[in-house]
Amino acid sequence: MRSVKRKRNQITLPLSMVMIFLLIPFLMAGCSSLSQERVTPTAAPRHPFSARSESEGGAVVFWSGYSDGYQAGEQTTFDLTIKNNTDQVWQGRYCLQLLARESATVLKTLAQKEINLEPGMGFSDEFTVQMPETLDPGAYGLSMAVRRPEGPMVDLIPIQVGGSNEVRKTTSQEDMNASLDACPPVEREGAAEQVEQAKSDLAERLKVDPSQISVENVEATDFSDASLGVPESGKSFAQVVTPGYIIMLKVDGQTYRYHASEARVVFVPEETVPTPSATTPEDAGTIDIPEQGTITTLPLHVLAHTEQPGQEVKLVLRWEDGTQLSKSLTTLEGPKGQGFIVDSLDWETESQPPQPETDQAILSVENSKGAVLDEQPLTVLHADDSQTRLIDLYWVVGETLETEQRRVLDTGGIEAATVKELLWGPPPRNLAGFLTALPTPNEVLDYPGRAADWGVRVELLGLTIDGGTATVNFSQELKAYGGGSARVQTIREQITRTLTQFPSVDEVIISVAGETEGVLQP
């Protein structure tokens, strides 16, 4: 019997293939690792905000950052732009502050810097700050306070720290006051001694410790005579222009005024009306809006004061080439019995209006005898100027809203500029019969519930846009609408439709003097 041995087939592999087989487990492990890295969830995207505030006098503050994603102890960066579009030199300060979650308390001043800007100048700054190490998760306030000679500006943005979904309480006037108290004004050179004298006098009057008194503002000015605008019975004062300061002090939320020169410091009682200049009483006039050197368009909006109500005056806009636009009117009676003008100038002809050869012009207020009460040099841009932009304004016609297209100066804050145009009311040449539901100056002055510190018209205090939501803050004169659900709804629609024409705005929140609760109720 023959035994048969089976020979196994042997396969010899090249060394390179052997190495590949040996490496496969490691390569698979690496791929698995890479796959795991790819599916690791990324951090939630942060939501940027940008806020712009512009005063009627021409102060512009623009800042931007994020409304969430902050962590205790971490650094974060903000952008800030400040422009001085006035005719005065600014000596001031800006402060970025972190406010507490539940109270009007400044937890920390994150950044502050003194600023000195010539008229027409500005600056942009990017700065990095560090959040406090002990910051708990939650909703806080981020405040930008800017001190300037004509008065402070404050803007507050709610932020979230540590991934919290908590919502901070509505911004209040107490928040604004706390922010200002933590951002001291820059005392003008030479006024330090006068400020201390004023604080000492006020402490004696109120029987409080001087440490309880804060300095609200110090402004250099020229008084019409040596009385510093506070005449005393039985005393005579030299009738010479006297340089000095207006000092505003604050105690427990109440503001007190002092006038000072190099020689004396005097308390100004509330009932005293300071004399601003040595002009003839019956003809005195002051143009508040527009300011000197303003760059603007037509219609030209004018706010001016005169000594007497019921006075026949004329607004005259004269270009360098001799072109002239004028309007006659009667001054209204202001809250303290003085005369005032609030109106707009524009061509009211149906034919092609004149086209001045130059942008340079002078606005004057003249009395019935042709005497100039006050005048301001301006730059009035042509309608087709590249610095202008076409916007839509919504006015009331019957029971519906209709649009008016208007050219406005576009300086980068077109949303705020458009709301300001809305507040000035329908155009002078109003053939369509446009009306507005927003309170007019006459309604503001006649409103039974007006407070002593109210002005003569509704003003825009600030506008912020965060994630498509525009929060627009009006002065307290907006309360003079008088009630009624239909009018309230129309006011809201005018504001909302005017703002949502811009891609940056999807939703509008209306506030009055920083308050959103209970505003515009029927």
Image (cartoon, rainbow, N blue to C red):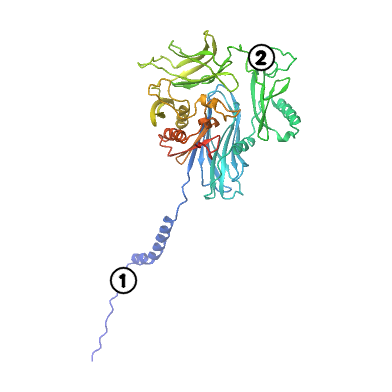
Measure the C-alpha gap from mark 1 to mark 2: 112 Å
Residue 271, position as x, y percentages in the image: 67, 23
State which mark lies toward you, 1 or 2.
2
**The residue tagged with tag 1: helix, strand or loop?**
loop
Side of 510 where 240 appears, left or right: right
Name the mark on residue 37. none
Q: Amino acid at mark 2?
A: Val
Q: Is residue 240 above or below residue 510?
A: above
Residue at x-position 58% and y-position 28%:
454
Residue pointed to by mark 2? 241
* Nearer to us in this view, 42 or 11: 42
Pointer 1 or 2: first along the chain: 1
Mark 1 crowd level (few <14, some 14–19, many ≥20, 10 Å Cα): few
* Nearer to us in this view, 382 or 109: 382
Q: Amino acid at mark 1?
A: Thr
Side of 416 where 234 appears, left or right: right
* Nearer to us in this view, 488 or 350: 488
Residue pointed to by mark 1? 12
Mark 2 crowd level (few <14, some 14–19, many ≥20, 10 Å Cα): some
**The residue tagged with tag 2: helix, strand or loop?**
loop
| Image quarter hosting the N terminus | bottom left
State how many labels appear.
2
Residue at x-position 62% and y-position 15%:
277
Q: Quadrant of residue 477?
A: top right
* Residue 387 seen in the current view: no
* Residue 417 seen in the current view: yes
Q: Quadrant of residue 205?
A: top right
Residue 418, position as x, y percentages in the image: 45, 29
Residue 396, position as x, y percentages in the image: 41, 29
* Nearer to us in this view, 13 or 136: 136
